[in-house]
């Protein structure tokens, strides 16, 4: 069963052909250079760039997979969350392709794509990574910071999320304050590594001791801003690496502390990370050492491109949705849903029982 998937949720125009969990081809056209000078993603510019590239990425994905569109069994597309006018481009194209070829369409939540990114295989079927439910998922991207119980295929329960900025957003903003462009995360990671990830300034770890699985980064951001303002331009340059490193440590420590709390609470020790921030080497090392101490099995997206937005993860999520016959109905207009959430957000309470999802 061959699935052609499209994702245009933010600033990557992407198309992939998958068969089960195997990726036969994956094409990602990044608009990052276009948005760099604006310090973030400009929706109208993103839409135009998607519209210009969409046919090209679809054709290239088909060609690289060695098939033509009549050989596709199912079409799939991201319906949200993301930028509304960007999502529309992919949805329109996928609807056209499905209608023209008389094939079913599957609509996928972008965040479920990031969860499935951990189980995407290359064309030879590697890595094998058997699925053993349940998992505890930490989703960390530019727009999302969420803790999710991945109970079974296509079954999720969100148990924590950010109440203000996402972790990736906080890193981007700190990067901007330090004077480097969008996205800020990679610059911060680089500077921090040059001072061995020292924590000189000991910024606050918001909500770390509070009885909640939610995250918050606005207080940390403010205290970072005040610290930066204490310095003259010249001093700031001297302290640049320490500032970047201390900020990154504060953000990562909150991610780890909430994951630990969630793992204790749910009894789940198989931890998955997904989303752009999960590519960060420092974060991965911190999670690996936590894994040793807490007897966790920790997983990251197996190939670099799978950390970022891509259509391969959407195709694999679509495969499991198709197994459950979750197709778009013929009369469904498939409207984009910019704020689409994963289902069943439950507010964590300390006396909550997660007996249903405990392993064994
Ligand atoms: Zn994403």
Image (cartoon, rainbow, N blue to C red):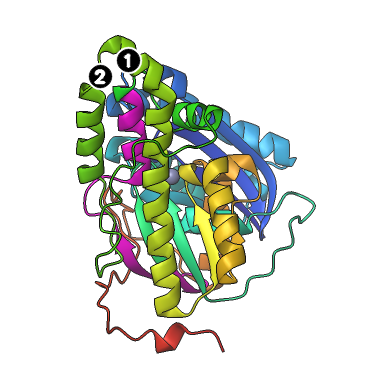
Q: Which sits in the foreground, 115 or 266?
A: 266
Is residue 262 left or right of 290 when viewed as pictured? left
Q: Position of residue 296 (x, y in %)?
A: 58, 69
For residue 241, above or below residue 120:
above
Q: Which residue is mark 1?
A: 235
Look at the numbered disc 2 and give the secondary structure of its residue: loop
| Mark 2 residue CB less than 8 A from any atom of ligand 1 | no
Mark number, residue 231: 2
Q: Nearer the viewer, residue 221 or 115?
A: 221
Image point (46%, 68%), residue name: 326
Residue located at (43% from left, 87% from top): 356
Residue sitting nearer the eye, 287 or 59: 287
Contact, CB < 8 Å: mark 1 with mark 2? yes
Q: Is residue 297 magenta?
A: no
Tell me residue 249's x, y (percent): 42, 43
Name of the residue lying farthest toward the top: 234
| Start-end of magenta stretch | 149-176
Quadrant location of the N terminus?
bottom right
């Amino acid at each position: 069963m061959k699935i052609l998937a499209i994702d245009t949720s933010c600033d990557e125009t992407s198309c992939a052909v998958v068969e089960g969990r195997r990726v036969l081809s994956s094409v990602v056209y990044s608009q990052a250079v276009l948005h760099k000078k604006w310090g973030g993603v400009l929706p109208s510019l993103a839409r135009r760039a998607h519209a210009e590239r969409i046919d090209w990425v679809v054709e290239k994905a088909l060609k690289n997979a060695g098939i033509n569109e009549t050989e596709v069994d199912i079409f799939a597309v991201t319906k949200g969350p993301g930028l509304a006018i960007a999502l529309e481009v992919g949805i329109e194209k996928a609807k056209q392709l499905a209608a023209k070829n008389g094939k079913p369409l599957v609509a996928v939540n972008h965040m479920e794509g990031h969860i499935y990114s951990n189980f995407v295989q290359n064309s030879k079927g590697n890595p094998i990574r058997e699925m053993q439910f349940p998992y505890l998922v930490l989703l960390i991207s530019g727009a999302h910071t969420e803790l999710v119980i991945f109970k079974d295929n296509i079954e999720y329960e969100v148990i924590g999320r950010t109440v203000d900025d996402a972790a990736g957003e906080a890193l981007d903003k700190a990067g901007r304050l330090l004077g480097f462009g969008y996205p800020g995360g990679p610059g911060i990671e680089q500077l921090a590594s040059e001072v061995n990830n020292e924590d000189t300034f000991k910024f606050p770890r918001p909500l770390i001791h509070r009885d909640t699985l939610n995250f918050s980064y606005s207080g940390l951001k403010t205290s970072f801003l005040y610290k930066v303002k204490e310095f003259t331009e010249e001093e700031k340059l001297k302290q640049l690496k320490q500032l970047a490193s201390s900020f990154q440590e504060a953000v990562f420590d909150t991610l780890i502390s909430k994951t630990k709390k969630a793992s204790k609470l749910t009894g789940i020790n198989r931890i998955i990370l997904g989303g752009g921030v999960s590519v960060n080497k420092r974060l991965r090392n911190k999670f690996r050492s936590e894994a040793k101490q807490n007897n966790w099995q920790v997983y990251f997206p197996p190939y670099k491109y799978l950390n970022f937005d891509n259509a391969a993860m959407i195709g694999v999520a679509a495969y499991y949705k198709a197994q459950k016959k979750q197709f778009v109905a013929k009369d469904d207009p498939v409207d984009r849903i910019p704020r689409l959430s994963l289902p069943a957000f439950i507010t964590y309470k300390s006396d909550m029982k997660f007996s249903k999802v405990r392993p064994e």
